[in-house]
């Protein structure tokens, strides 16, 4: 299965990120993450997990409150808050979905995905 198509339950994501599932629910209630929902089940994509890693860095390493993150994201992209390196940004889907990114910047694609790209 392709990495971008994989889905993870809240329990699995909590385990992967060493969090309590309630923390993920809190982030969802705050509007910081929107996992796919099917009935009562939440499903997270790899993109969600990458965003959660960034979010955790802001909150736990840099001490930014959840409310402050919400306010900051209204005015500036996440990579300005976390101060991601350009190399990390070149692999970030949020970075490339932004209208602030010049079109000349080339997105890095992991080696195993290069065959899936149409020429």
Image: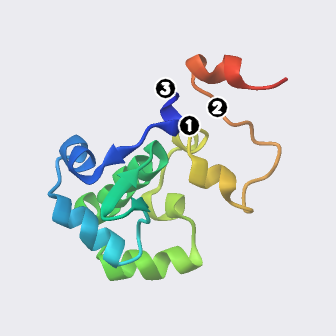
| Numbered disc in front, either 2 or 3 | 3
Residue visible at 24% across and 46% down?
A: 17
Bin the neighbour count of mark 3 within 10 Å (Cα to Cα): few under 14, some 14-19, many 20 and up: few
Cα distance between the residues tagged 1 and 2: 9 Å
Position of 25 with respect to 119 (left or right) is left
Give the CA distance from mark 2 to mark 3: 20 Å
| Residue under pointer 3 | 1
- Kindly indicate whether the residue at mark 3 contacts the one at mark 1 (C-beta within 8 angstroms): no
Lower position in the chain sequence, tag 1 or tag 2: 1
Instruction: Choose top left, top right, bottom left or bottom right for residue 41.
Output: bottom left
Q: Of the two numbered discs 1 and 3 on the same chain, state the one appearing first in sequence.
A: 3
- Residue 2 visible to an observer of this rendering: yes
Q: Which secondary structure, mark 3?
A: loop
41 lies left or right of 23 = right
Q: Residue at x 29, y 76 (%)?
A: 65
Q: Residues within 10 Å of mark 2 (few under 14, many from 20)?
A: few
SS of the residue under disc 1: helix
Q: Which residue is mark 1?
A: 87
Residue sitting at the far front: 39
Q: Nearer the viewer, residue 31 or 60?
A: 31
């Amino acid at each position: 299965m392709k990495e971008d198509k994989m889905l993870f339950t809240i329990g699995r994501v909590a385990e992967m990120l060493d969090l309590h599932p309630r923390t993920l629910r809190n982030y969802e209630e705050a509007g910081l993450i929107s996992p796919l929902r099917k009935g009562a089940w939440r499903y997270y994509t790899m993109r969600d997990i990458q965003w959660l890693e960034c979010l955790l860095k802001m909150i736990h390493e840099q001490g930014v409150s959840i409310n402050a993150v919400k306010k900051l994201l209204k005015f500036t992209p996440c990579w300005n808050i976390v101060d991601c390196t350009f190399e990390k940004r070149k692999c970030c889907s949020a970075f490339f979905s932004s209208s602030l990114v010049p079109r000349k910047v080339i997105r890095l694609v992991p080696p195993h995905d290069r065959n899936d790209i149409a020429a």
